[in-house]
Image (tube, helix red, strand yellow):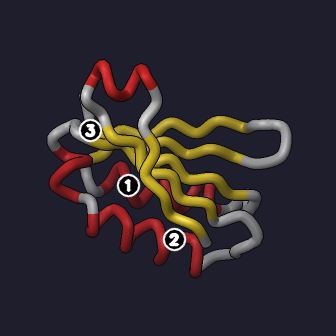
Amino acid sequence: MMVWIAESEEDRMAKIRTIELNILGQVCPACLLVVLRELNTHRKRLKNGEARLIVKTDHRDTTRTIPESARKMGYDVEVRNLDTCYEITIGKKE
């Protein structure tokens, strides 16, 4: 598992911090627990729109469990199916 904070030029202009979480190779419930920990760690920044969490996973079940949990916590969630993995973006609800 890797967590890093990255800022693209677009993010710097919008003053949004991107927190990337790589959980490739992990399976539930570990995936959900790791993401919930990161959501709680960065809760203030995520809730006020200063950050977004991008989760990369190859475990299909997480495309259901993580978005469902994040939405119940009041976040906006987008799931994308990329060539080699899924990308789940979690951020402030608009």
Mark 3 or mark 1, earlier in chain: 1
Hey, what amino acid is under mark 3? Lys
Give the spatial CA distance, label 3 vs label 1: 10 Å
Hey, what amino acid is under mark 1? Ala
* Figure quadrant of the N terminus: bottom right
Q: Quadrant of residue 51?
A: top left
Q: Nearer the viewer, residue 84 or 80?
A: 84
Residue that mark 3 sits on = 92
Q: Residue at x 84, y 38 (%)?
A: 83
Query: Quick check: marks 1 and 2 in contact, CB under 8 Å?
Result: no
Q: Is residue 4 left or right of residue 76?
A: right
Give the spatial CA distance, label 1 vs label 2: 10 Å
Question: Relative to 6, does residue 13 appear above or below in the rendering?
Answer: above
Residue that mark 1 sits on = 70
Q: Quick one: SS at disc 2?
A: helix
Q: Nearer the viewer, residue 61 or 21?
A: 21
Residue that mark 2 sits on = 32
Residue 90, horizontal then vertical, whole percent: 41, 45
Q: Residue at x 22, y 58 (%)?
A: 43
Hey, what amino acid is under mark 2? Leu
Q: Quick one: SS at disc 1?
A: helix
Q: Residue at x 25, y 47 (%)?
A: 46
